[in-house]
């Protein structure tokens, strides 16, 4: 199973669209995780059109889109806990790890955005992924996303950057 992991679209306030190569990867995935900050109903609608299945959360820059602050989804034996990670950059890892611990077991993978920094790290025993910004919205250095291959509880992660 292929899981596209994206976030921080910021369309239209900072960028105009998701780059075409990423649109293709999103559409080819079996499931899409989005960490929030769509920035508009139109951006959310675009991701929903592209994604075969979507799990998404609300970001601090989003209008009322009817999305939850956190979401948990299991795919092929890997449990993902999504949150935007809203707040100061200081303490971001602590906030994300605490959200994961409060929503799932210790083996769950935290997926968060907000900082626009690409990360794959373990913080206090919790693996945390941040795909950066799918559009390259400032302060990101470029557009980025992850594609995870999930098989029998194993996760193989591939970073894509433009």
Image: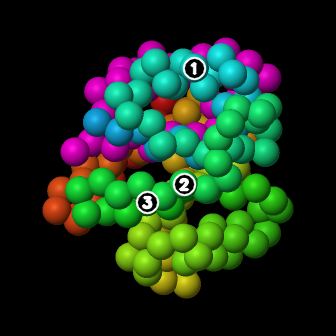
At mark 1, the secondary structure is helix
Q: Residue furthest right?
A: 88
Name which residue lies at 64% across and 48% down. Answer: 68
- What residue lies at 76% left-to-right and 56% top-to-bottom? 86
Residue 101 image position (x, y, % from top left) = 55, 77
- What separation in Å lies between label 3 and label 2 (alpha carbons)? 8 Å
Residue 121 visible to an observer of this rendering: no
**Which label belongs to residue 45?**
1
Residue 103 image-quadrant placement? bottom right
In front: 132, or 47?
47
138 or 41: nearer the viewer: 41
Q: Which residue is mark 3?
A: 80
Disc 1 crowd rating (10 Å Cα; few below 14, some 14-19, many 20+) is: few
Instruction: Say which label, 3 or 2, has the lower sequence index.
Output: 2
Q: Which quarter of the figure has residue 66?
A: top right
Measure the alpha-carbon separation of dots 1 and 2: 19 Å
Residue reaching furthest bottom? 124
Which numbered circle lies on residue 71?
2
Please tell me whether residue 147 is drawn above or below residue 72 in the rendered image: above
How far across and down, in percent of the image, does residue 13 sit? 79, 23
Relative to 127, does residue 150 appear above or below in the rendering? above
Give the residues drawn in magenta, as a range: 1-29
Colour scheme of the picture: rainbow
Classify 158 as above or below 48. Answer: below
Q: State which quarter of the image contains the N terminus.
A: top left
């Amino acid at each position: 199973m292929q899981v596209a992991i994206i976030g921080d679209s910021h369309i239209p306030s900072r960028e105009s669209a998701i780059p075409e190569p990423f649109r293709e990867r999103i559409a080819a995935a079996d499931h899409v995780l989005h960490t929030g900050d769509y920035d508009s109903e139109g951006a959310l609608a675009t991701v929903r059109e592209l994604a075969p299945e979507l799990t998404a959360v609300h970001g601090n820059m989003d209008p009322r889109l009817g999305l939850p602050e956190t979401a948990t989804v299991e795919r092929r034996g890997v449990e993902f806990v999504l949150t935007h990670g809203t707040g100061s950059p200081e303490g971001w890892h602590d906030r994300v790890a605490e959200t994961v611990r409060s929503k799932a077991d210790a083996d769950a993978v935290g997926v968060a955005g907000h900082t626009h920094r690409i990360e794959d790290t373990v913080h206090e025993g919790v693996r945390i992924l941040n795909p950066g910004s799918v559009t390259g919205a400032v302060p990101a250095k470029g557009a980025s996303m992850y594609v995870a291959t999930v098989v029998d509880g194993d996760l193989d992660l591939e970073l894509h950057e433009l």
